[in-house]
Image (cartoon, grey):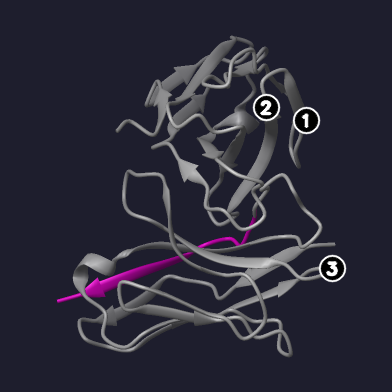
Amino acid sequence: NAGVTQTPKFRILKIGQSMTLQCAQDMNHNYMYWYRQDPGMGLKLIYYSVGAGITDKGEVPNGYNVSRSTTEDFPLRLELAAPSQTSVYFCASCGTTGHNSPLHFGNGTRLTVT
Amino acid sequence: GNSVTQMEGPVTLSEEAFLTINCTYTATGYPSLFWYVQYPGEGLQLLLKATKADDKGSNKGFEATYRKETTSFHLEKGSVQVSDSAVYFCALTPGSSNTGKLIFGQGTTLQVKP
């Protein structure tokens, strides 16, 4: 039972490069989320999706883009990497209406931009 | 707005000691409250939850009670083990939310020494 799978686990980018962080879930969940985790700051929501074809901004969307062409996949795109985007990125999914349902998290992608 | 504040860490305890991690929140309406745990190198996992005032969430010896009068959801465990060493996050979903978005505290690191 894979749950939420994120790739890659680690990545080093140079300033100005682009990359896509992959996220896939096999639980047929409608709701998916991207968070970033910075030391001492908790997790901040970047983007989320309530179903295929629907995405919306979270608290810290600048510098990122997402798409949701299928229920399973929710990739996060960085177009012009900046040092401020050095962080650990977590993808999560949720199955029902979401109000009191737990989120299922992937194991994270650690990104360093130099 | 909605926010979560946790006690600062790290918290260092000896095995079998009593644990309290304080969490207070600000929210409109009637939020659901959660504790998530993050073990080293892993994503977050739901530890326990409470969805209405006076509810007690419990799991793996951990407990937390939803106190609306003090807007608190403190995490407790009577006797910690080395295996409890992790980062603990308090979180909420606003009462008006139907998208499952979580608002996290900054996290508290617990280190348990043998």
Main secondary-structure element of the magenta-colored stretch? strand
Task: Check contact, mark 1 vs mark 2: CB within 8 A.
Answer: no
Say if labels 1 and 2 share a chain: yes
Specify start and end residues of the magenta stretch as a single range: B103-114
Residue pointed to by mark 1: A56
- For mark 3, give the secondary structure: loop
Q: Residue at x 59, y 39 (%)?
A: A35
Residue count near mark 3 (Cα–Cα under 10 Å), binned few <14, some 14–19, many ≥20: few
Depth order, front residue of A57/A36: A57
Q: Earlier in the sequence, mark 1 or mark 2?
A: 2
For badge 1, the amino acid type reads Asp
Q: Is residue B113 magenta?
A: yes
Residue A79 spot, x, y in % from top left? 67, 12
Q: Name the mark on residue B28.
A: 3
Quick one: which residue is furthest to the left in this view? Answer: B114
Residue pointed to by mark 2: A51
